[in-house]
Image (cartoon, rainbow, N blue to C red):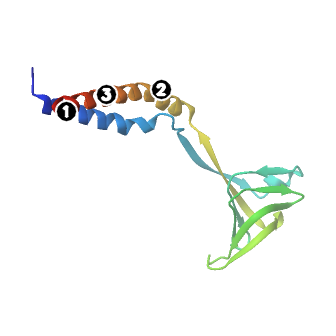
Amino acid sequence: MYGGTGSRLRMLSWALLVAVLLLPLGGCAFTRDKVVLITADTPRTGKRREVTTPVKAHLKDGSVVLFPQGLTVDEGVLRGAGEQYDLARTKRTLVYTVPIDQIAAVEAYEREVRPVESAVGTALAAPVAVVTVGLSALLVFFLLLSL
């Protein structure tokens, strides 16, 4: 047989390390963040719209209002807990409403799940988990034999 117990332990240890490093891939959702640009004319439809993801509103005066928890567009006004930064981004002011006529553009940040990558990662995780448990058992067995 090739090598002794020491070489088998080293080989099992490396295989176990690789399996453990691959294990977190399963059960993870692979996502992609994208920025959706909304023009100032988009919210003027008169319908109430709620955005639950972070939003950045660029105002005509050059300042920016960040709404980290999202906002509601209703009756020509953006409503939400926001922070307005001046043109130089040195002064911060808390705001709760921004009239739409002051807005140049609005960015909404959306996270989409990538189902194919997520399914493949999860499918690969099951065999990796089985191999990891098996290699762990073998490693413990050979460690006990070497005592």
Badge 1: few (under 14), some or many (20 or more) residues near its Cα, within 10 Å? Answer: some
Q: Residue at x 44, y 30 (%)?
A: 125
Q: Which mark is on residue 9?
A: 1
Q: Secondary structure at mark 1?
A: helix
- Identify which residue is drawn at 52% across, 39% down: 30
Image coordinates of residue 16 in percent, x first then y, are 30, 34
- Tell me the distance, in whole angstroms, between the alpha carbons under discs 2 and 3: 23 Å
State the residue at coordinates (88%, 49%): 47
Res. 137 mark: 3
The Cα atoms of the two marked residues, 1 and 2, are separated by 28 Å
Disc 2 residue crowd, few under 14, some 14–19, many 20+, Cα 10 Å: some
Q: Please, what secondary structure does the residue beneath circle 3 have? A: helix
Residue identified by numbered label 2: 123
SS at mark 2?
helix
Q: In the image, what residue type sits under mark 1?
A: Leu
Q: Name the amino acid, label 2.
A: Ala
Tell me which amino acid carries mark 3: Ala
